[in-house]
Image (tube, rainbow, N blue to C red):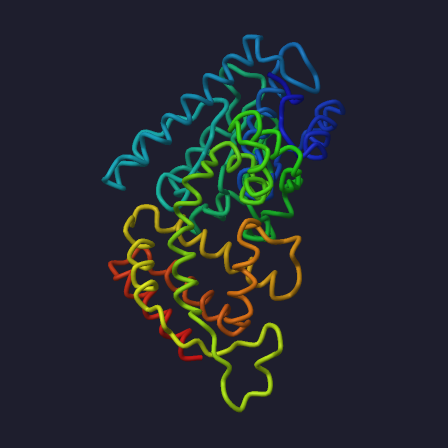
């Protein structure tokens, strides 16, 4: 195992290896970029490399320090997973013990002040087993507001023996004062060629299905490795019925001079309400995966916008191009915006005890009244 096995983001890897080679690894680093591109993985690799006994700009994975580092990471992941399963939120923060190499991640919706306090307690002491202590703060944007000032103080004067690595999707979700005290390493979506190789080798997809799967992965290595194309198509199917039933057979609005212009909404005759209602029932059957269902809907709306503005190269659902054009032309930008606003509302309300099917039914009626 070494940096050479990291997939994608070759510039970020080169930057990290350059720091190691020059012996100029900053006391505080910020790894920022899209989810699923390997930010935390590279942070863990760097944590091993700064402690490796054999290599200067890489890690061997075999020396005593590399083996200890891997063991500490494993224990840290297991501890985080165990704490998240504790139903009593107050007990989730009991008995924190941080190793020389520690992964600090949310155990509730937030990284709590108790976690950051424990980080402070160990950061200013010498490492016990490794040459340098590394504290990886994953999803750093979720540090609770009560703990932000404490984190900032540590970053202002990081001890020589401790390296902080903050990992987050968007650097601008962090306070400017925190960003200014970290050296940023920017990550980008993985190249299509990298994603295609993963899908072909690990998922064993037929070549005919690769273009669609690559678009669905959207540059995310994690999404590509976990992608089940059949499951995706099943999750997408009710949305197709929803949109088909929603647009019905279009009838020009009398007296409108714009009905023949592309992208201008026309009034449907609402001939297929049963399809709409059947689709909303299917979309809301599994509450535990409703967020994933909404994400599929968002992707379809982005495709409709792309089709409407002749940006076919941005379309994700490549196999639906003919239907996307029909939906886009009949809904128009007004209808697409209403659907998007409706999905935003559904996303915000998903943690509350609301009737999700009724919400999507009402959204269809609202779009139909435009």
Task: Report which quarter residue 159 is drawn in.
Answer: top right
Where does residue 300 sit, x and y in percent of width and height?
Answer: 50, 56
The quadrant the N terminus occupies is top right
- Report whether 195 appears left or right of 94: right
Q: Residue at x 45, y 56 (%)?
A: 297
Q: Residue at x 60, y 66 (%)?
A: 308
- Report whether 261 appears left or right of 205: right
Q: Is residue 77 positioned above or below 87 on the image?
A: above
Name the residue nearer the viewer: 346 or 28: 346
Q: Residue at x 44, y 43 (%)?
A: 232
Q: Is residue 32 positioned above or below 48 on the image?
A: below
| Any part of residue 216 in sight | yes
Where does residue 335 sit, x and y in percent of width and height?
Answer: 48, 72
- Total marks placed: 0
Q: Is residue 72 positioned above or below 64 on the image?
A: below
Where does residue 13 sit, x and y in percent of width and height?
Answer: 68, 30
The quadrant the C terminus occupies is bottom left
Q: Residue at x 66, y 33 (%)?
A: 26
Residue furthest right as drawn: 22
Name the residue nearer the viewer: 126 or 90: 90
Where does residue 339 sit, x and y in percent of width and height?
Answer: 45, 67
Name the residue nearer the viewer: 62 or 255: 255
- Report whether 16 appears left or right of 287: right
Task: Report which quarter residue 363 is drawn in.
Answer: bottom left
Task: Report which quarter residue 54 is drawn in.
Answer: top right
Q: Is residue 240 positioned above or below 85 on the image?
A: below
| Any part of residue 156 in sight | no
């Amino acid at each position: 195992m070494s940096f050479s096995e990291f997939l994608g983001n070759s510039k970020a890897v080169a930057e990290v290896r350059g720091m190691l080679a020059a012996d100029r690894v900053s006391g505080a680093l910020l790894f920022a970029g899209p989810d699923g591109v390997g930010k935390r993985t590279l942070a863990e690799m760097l944590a091993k490399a700064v402690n490796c006994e054999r290599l200067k700009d890489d890690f061997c994975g075999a020396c005593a320090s590399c083996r200890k580092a891997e063991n500490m990471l494993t224990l840290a992941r297991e501890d985080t997973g165990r704490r998240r399963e504790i139903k009593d939120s107050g007990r989730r923060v009991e008995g924190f013990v941080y190793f020389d190499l520690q992964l600090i991640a949310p155990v509730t919706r937030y990284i709590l002040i108790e976690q950051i306090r424990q980080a402070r307690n160990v950061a200013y002491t010498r490492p016990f087993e490794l040459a340098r202590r590394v504290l990886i703060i994953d999803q750093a944007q979720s540090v609770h507001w009560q703990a932000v000032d404490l984190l900032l103080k540590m970053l202002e004067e990081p001890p020589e023996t401790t390296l902080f690595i903050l990992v987050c999707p968007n650097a601008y979700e962090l306070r400017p004062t925190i960003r200014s005290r970290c050296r940023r390493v920017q990550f980008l979506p993985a190249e299509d060629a990298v994603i295609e190789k993963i899908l072909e080798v690990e998922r064993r997809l037929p070549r005919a299905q690769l273009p669609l799967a690559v678009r669905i992965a959207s540059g995310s290595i994690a999404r590509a490795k976990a992608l089940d194309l059949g499951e995706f198509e099943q999750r997408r199917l009710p949305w197709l019925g929803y949109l088909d039933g929603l647009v019905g057979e279009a009838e020009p609005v009398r007296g409108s001079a714009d009905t023949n212009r592309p992208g201008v909404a026309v009034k449907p005759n609402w001939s297929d309400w049963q399809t709409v209602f059947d689709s909303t029932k299917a979309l809301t059957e599994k509450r535990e995966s409703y967020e994933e269902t909404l994400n599929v809907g968002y992707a379809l709306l982005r495709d409709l916008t792309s089709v409407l503005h002749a940006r076919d190269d941005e379309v994700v659902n490549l196999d639906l191009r003919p239907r996307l054009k029909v939906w886009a032309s009949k809904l128009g930008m007004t209808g697409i915006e209403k659907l998007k606003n409706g999905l935003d509302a559904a996303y915000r309300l998903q943690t509350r005890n609301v009737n999700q099917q009724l919400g999507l039914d009402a959204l269809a009626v609202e779009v139909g009244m435009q």
